[in-house]
Image: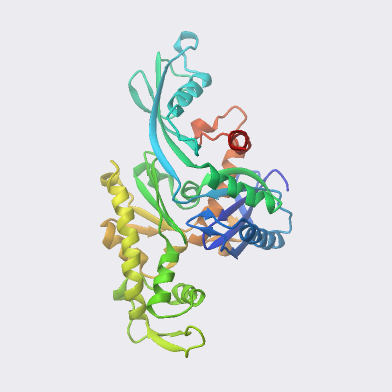
Amino acid sequence: MSGNVFVGLDIGTTKVACIIAEADRNGELKIMGVGVSPSDGLRKGVVVNIDKTVKSIQKAVDEAELMAGIDVTEVYVGIAGDHIRAINSRGAIATKGENNEITQHDVDRAIENAKAVSMPRDREILHVIPQEFIVDEQKGIKDPIGMCGVRLETQVHIITGAVASAQNIYKSVEKAGLKVADLVLEPLASSYAVLEEDEKELGVGLIDMGGGTTDIAIYYENSIRHTAVVGMGGEYVTKDIAQGIRTPIDHAEEIKRLHGCAFAPLAKSQQFVSVPGVGGREQREVSRATLASIIEPRIEEILTIARREILRTEYASILGAGLVFTGGGALMEGIQELAEKVFEMPVKIGYPHGFGGLTEAARSPIHATGVGLCKYAMEKNWKQPDDKAAIGGDGFKPIFDRMASWVKEFF
């Protein structure tokens, strides 16, 4: 696998998706391969069966490899789940540069200072993302290197995850014969694929509706300000359908995908859906209006919890660009109308953009995380050697450093 080929692996509750992309000399991304396989080894974004997860990963990667005509060795992996937690923290130092000039060393010390927060033994920092720097009380600085000042302060967004959950993802990918280049929070990865720079500057909320969880990320002044996870997703809707119209789970999932509607006024009672019976019982028909009456309350509940999460932040009233919905849940008819009703602000569906190649195969909300992982990988690897990820907005320790510390501490 050449140095300008990047692979994003989205390991979700209901599907595993693999995106293979190549960057040309101008830094433009070209999608070469897309692979998707069902996933039944995870619950709410957390691995519960490693063997099933490994098989799903291998199937998705094999499909993408066949399409791209290359062998994959290294992947950027998305991580999510209701074990994810996030806090904002500050750190301050006195500068030591000549003539009080701020150096990269000063920036690194300030970020390390901000990272010094109390952490339970079973949790590990995944990301430390600088939001802004403050030089001698001058706020809103994105890159302080070269400026003069005697005090440097930084505000960072710290995202943590359960060590065991991260280890199980890493182990599953390794057993599938792949090397993990980095673990990236899924809504953070999705933002690379679906958000515009002006949206992130003005203020925007990203809501990624997956099968097991609904992930939230809030951006303002081009920095991530808040992340959260709602431990409910599309599989709850599927179970409601299965119980409400008495049909097996796999048929309920297909009915939801093909005929589901999240906003009852859009579903016509004259339209009917064939429903297979349980245990060999006869097939019958159910109107789309009845189906929508089952789906809408559950999705409204999920959105209401997400709204409550956003309202408890200081950015709820300044989301000038509104909300962007992505993930598999964003494909359901009526989700935009219902979301606008619940949140009382503009909502758009986020489709991955900014790439060429197999655009039709990858331009779907379900591939937002996979495409975003490739974009993240490209941006990280296209940085000049003297650029620091902390200034660019992604203060990550290499995944192998993190894993080495986890293994040393727990085993």
Q: Residue at x 67, y 49 (%)?
A: 174
Residue 62 shown left or right of residue 184 in the figure: right
Q: Residue at x 37, y 38 (%)?
A: 221
Where is residue 311 drawn, in percent x and y?
Answer: 27, 48
Where is residue 79 drawn, in percent x and y?
Answer: 52, 49
Q: Looking at the picture, tell me which residue is in the foreground, 391 or 208.
A: 208
Residue 22 seen from this side: no
Where is residue 282 drawn, in percent x and y?
Answer: 47, 91
Residue 293 shown left or right of residue 197 in the figure: left
Quadrant of the image containing the C terminus: top right
Outermost residue, bottom direction? 282
Residue 121 shown left or right of residue 402 in the figure: left
Residue 255 vertical placement versus 135 (above, below): below
Residue 243 vertical placement versus 108 (above, below): below
Residue 81 vertical placement versus 129 (above, below): below
Residue 99 seen from this side: yes
Residue 340 shown left or right of residue 34 in the figure: left
Where is residue 193 drawn, in percent x and y?
Answer: 50, 51
Q: Residue at x 73, y 55 (%)?
A: 70
Outermost residue, top direction? 99
